[in-house]
Image: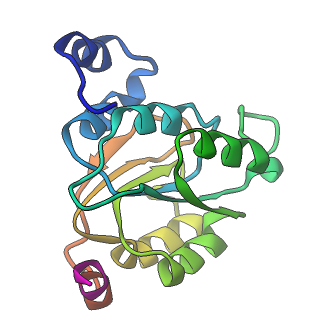
Amino acid sequence: MAGVSWIQRLYWRYLSKPVAYRALYLHAIDTPIGSILELGMGSGERIRNVLGLCSLPEGVTQLRYAAVDPFESAGTDVPHISLKGAHRLLNEFGVKARLLPGEPSSGVMRVAHTVLPSDLIVIDGYWNESSANGEAITKWLPRLCHSKSAIFASAEKGGSLVRIPTPSVVSEQSKATKAA
């Protein structure tokens, strides 16, 4: 969506459901996004809405997207997208995607070594955990973002996404890679 009218903006600010994602949707409307990293895709509806709202920065021809998610092994306690369904969804939007099946404790390190720092990072359900997933995310977050990254996180899956500050120590490799 190239431009969002005032009535659409009003909808996304006050009427969109779930309420937990409104801050993320408004950020997607207001800020050009060239790359997204999502830790936990859930049902896929959140990224479908974000992709429909965001615009690309100047000079970027294609949105870059990466996700770490358990996909089929997530269990049946919450609605979850399959790996095949995620590829289908992202292909609808013409997004170049890198999907890594598994828990963030193992996948976040692979993303940090292979994917450039992202403009938008969504952490769904693993933030501030004292588990292996939470510790891995905290450890690798400075390599996953750059100084202008926006990070939205929730402590529980499907919970309210809150914008958290970018780590004060963003690795030098992240800065050099972003500049290149």
Q: Position of residue 64 (x, y in %)?
A: 45, 60
Name the residue at 25% across, 88% down. 176
Picture coordinates of residue 21, whole percent (x, y): 39, 31
> In this picture, is 127 found above or below 41?
below
Question: Viewer-proximal residue, 168 or 43?
Answer: 43
Q: Main secondary structure of the magenta part?
A: helix
In-image side of 18 versus 54 (left or right): right
Residue 80, above or below 112: above
The magenta segment = 176-180
Rendered-image quadrant of the N terminus: top left
Left or right: residue 119 compared with residue 147? right
Image height check: is 155 above or below 30?
Answer: below
Question: Is 179 in the magenta?
Answer: yes
Foreground pick, 141 / 133 = 141
Image position of 101 (left or right of 58): right
Residue 66 at x, y = what percent?
53, 61
Name the residue: 30% across, 12% down.
11
